[in-house]
Image (cartoon, rainbow, N blue to C red):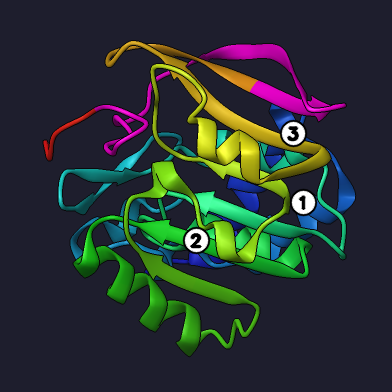
Amino acid sequence: MTDFKSLQEEMVTQQIMGRGVVTPRVIEAFRKVSRHLFIPEQFRSHAYNDHPLPIGEGQTISQPYMVALMTDLLDLTEEDKVLEIGTGSGYQAAILAELAKEVYTIERHRALAERAKRILQELDYKNVKVLVGDGTKGRKEFSPYQKIIVTASAPGVPQPLFEQLDEMGKLVIPVGGRWSQDLVLIQKKKGEMISKPVCGCVFVPLIGEYGYGGSD
């Protein structure tokens, strides 16, 4: 029988806190949300390992540290409305739900969206709305968002997402080529985009009208 609780604590202390993410609210969320519940059964024993894992449809659940770093960069408050692009497993959405007031998360693969929605409902997250569609367009009807997180790589910041970001809001996104990117923190100040590179990273491509075209 796998001792998931011990593995989870090891992940938090060694992979996340050990690399400098120590914000108390963020750490509390990572201790509370059980990562293995969001991972397909055949990979569950690796849930707390220091690397991404496949979740189906050619998509992955990100390395725990990357999820923590992106969450920490958002500087979330209990009053924030958050937009997530790329629901994937639903794990990041659950972490966001622990820290923000409302979470809207968009997934282009219906099968992944439905699976994530079911898990989030089973875990009683009432402040998460899972949507299916082209995430590069955002969802204007629920905007503005104080925080936006994009969990797939784009050649640039999709214009609709920046438009839907609140004044002084923050957006975290991997930007670059298909095989390597820079994680970038964007802030909207007087309608202008203030960009700060954080670190190198590798994410699956963001497919959509304002990302990479096509359906691959």
The residue carrying mark 2 is 105
Q: Quote the CA–CA distance across marks 2 and 3.
A: 18 Å
Magenta stretch: includes residue 57:
no
Q: Position of residue 21 (x, y in %)?
A: 76, 34
| Amino acid beneath label 3 | Leu
Q: From the viewer's side, name the closer residue of 158 and 110.
A: 158
Q: Which mark is residue 73?
A: 3
Instruction: Give neighbour class at mark 2: few <14, some 14-19, many 20+ (Cα, 10 Å).
Output: many
- Residue 15 shows in this picture: no
Q: Nearer the viewer, mark 3 or mark 1?
A: 3
Query: SS class of the residue under badge 2?
Result: strand
- Which residue lies at the image location 58% right of the left edge and 42% below the top edge? 149
Give, as a three-letter code, the residue at label 1: Ile
Magenta segment = 185-212
> Would residue 146 be found to the left or right of residue 7 on screen?
right
* Number of the label disc, if any, that sits on residue 27: 1
The earlier-in-sequence mark between 2 and 1 is 1
Q: Residue at x 44, y 63 (%)?
A: 90
- Disc 2 residue type? Thr
